Image: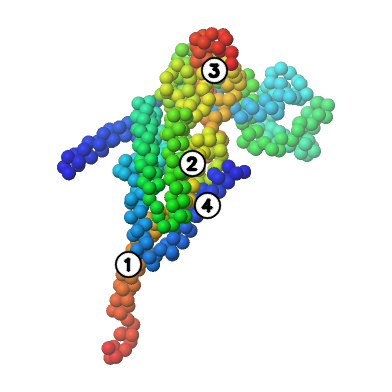
Amino acid sequence: MRMRARYGWIVCLGLFLLLFPALPVKTKPASGPDNDDADAAGPKFSLEAASIFGKRCTACHTYGKGTKVGPDLKGVTDRRKRDWLLKFIHASSVVIQSGDPTATALFAEFKQQRMPDWTDLSEKQINDILDFISIGGPDIKPADERNAELATASDIEQGRQLFFGEAPLKYGSQSCASCHSVQGNGWRGGTLGPDLTDVYLRHQDLALTAFLRQPCFRWEAGAAAGPYLTVKESFALKSFLRQSAVQHKNQVGPAGGSR
Amino acid sequence: MKLNFLFAIFPYVAPGLLVVGTAVRYLLLRKHPEIISAEIKEVKASLAGNRLWQISLVFLVVGHLIALVMPRMLLQWNSSHTRLYLLEGAAFAIGCAALAGWIVVLWRSLSRHGESRLIELSDMALLALLFVGISSGLLMAVLYRWGSTWGAMILTPYLMSVLRGEAAAHFVLQMPFLARLHVFSLFASIAVLPVTRVGTVLVVGLRAIFGLAGRLASGAAGAAEGWFKKHNPAGWLWPEED
């Protein structure tokens, strides 16, 4: 009986020692304190605003390249008051009909071509677009859009650490290796999701950038709405995936690498 | 649609069947303690299995509960590759032990014949579902590595959503067939439980709860009666009548 109790204590102590490192600890981010999106492109840069700007504004406006269908938007936030811009973007027809002198002058200047009413955009979304314009957003290339060919050894190493969960992702997302593996790294990656060894060569830089902007699995309620990776993390992961793909292609040869 | 039923509606049907089935069996057996004790003996002789079966089942249940209740801690544990390998290796070994124990249980169950054909059939159905659960778990461990990590990421939120009453079936619907089978076997086992011999254990548990509640109520009633007797207003109003 006494022996059994002693074994029980030894087992409990062993479990405790194993469990101890699993207690939550604050781990150091992979890329130091400057790894968040805000630092990468200014405090008001928003990928959503950039996307809306690309989809809704660029068809009729340029940024610093002169008049298109409508006026050049470079400096528009200095030329007009924020309140006026908010009202005009939300419902230009209402502003014109109200007899606003600036709006009617613009309407006359641009051959009575009225801007569509973007009533589906919230005030915050319009403000974000205006912020994006005011900081010269259209001229800024987000860090994750850089071609992975330009990655340094440090970027690739950072990507490797993030991929295998050796460094935490800023927004608490789980590492890619939870479900995916990359050849040449033993059993470290999971096999629930597809093998990502050649994913860079299959999708190329731009498509992979766009893919990494979306959570690959809605594993938590509301996760799809929240941020997933910072632009720097996205670039680091892309760089690691590129290096893995290139290494694999070199090992297998051109015939084996052309899947 | 069918899959949506299995993972969005059936998770609530199964506990409903468990409650109703247990209540019906309780009503049928409550005045037949001899049948209850005979069936409990049968459970001990066949389904309870050997020590290996019991210990491995306890470990499997506790392991799954930890993943359900403390997924963050589990993910933190798995953040070290050594600990991940250790956990997955141990879980696989326990799964294999459970499978070995299951074979023994099946052997014992096949060699015994009870009075009720329905209960025998449901026992076999429960054993089959347990086999599906254990073997799909083992196969997943082999084919879809690191289930303790992705399970905590994907299946735990699903089960929590079921417990919250708003089953988010999309978590499971995106999973491979084996994972869906594993989850379904859990709910199906819950559903058939009351019509198996294990259901008698539930009846015994229910009897014990009712017995305890009855004793508590009777004690409380006795205490209340005593208090009312002591503080009877009639005693103050007509003291001479005492």
**Cβ atoms at labels 1 and 2 below 8 Å apart:** no
User: Tag 3: residue type?
Assistant: Asp
Q: Secondary structure at mark 2?
A: helix
Subunit ID for the residue under disc 3: A
Q: Position of residue B118 (x, y in %)?
A: 47, 55
Gap in angstroms between the C-alphas marked 3 and 4: 44 Å
Gap in angstroms between the C-alphas marked 3 and 1: 69 Å
The earlier-in-sequence mark between 2 and 4 is 4
Q: Write down the residue under mark 2.
A: B183
Q: Write down the residue under mark 3.
A: A198
Q: Position of residue B94 (x, y in %)?
A: 35, 36
Quarter of the image where the N terminus of chain B is located: top right
Residue at figure coordinates x 49%, y 9% from the top left: A251
Q: Is residue A211 above or below residue B135?
A: above
Q: Is residue B98 visible to the viewer in this orientation of the structure?
A: no
**Cβ atoms at labels 3 and 4 below 8 Å apart:** no
Label 4 Cα neighbours within 10 Å, binned few <14 / some 14-19 / many ≥20: some
Gap in angstroms between the C-alphas marked 2 and 3: 32 Å
Q: Is residue A146 above or below residue A226?
A: above
Residue at figure coordinates x 74%, y 35% from the top left: A117
The answer as to whether the residues below labels 4 and 1 share one chain is: yes
Q: Nearer the viewer, residue B23 or A54?
A: B23
Q: Is residue B62 above or below residue A147?
A: below
Mark on residue B215? 1
Subunit ID for the residue under disc 1: B
The earlier-in-sequence mark between 4 and 1 is 4
Gap in angstroms between the C-alphas marked 1 and 2: 39 Å
Q: Write down the residue under mark 4.
A: B13
Quarter of the image where the C terminus of chain B is located: bottom left
Q: Is residue B139 visible to the viewer in this orientation of the structure?
A: yes
Frontmost of labels 2 and 3 is 2
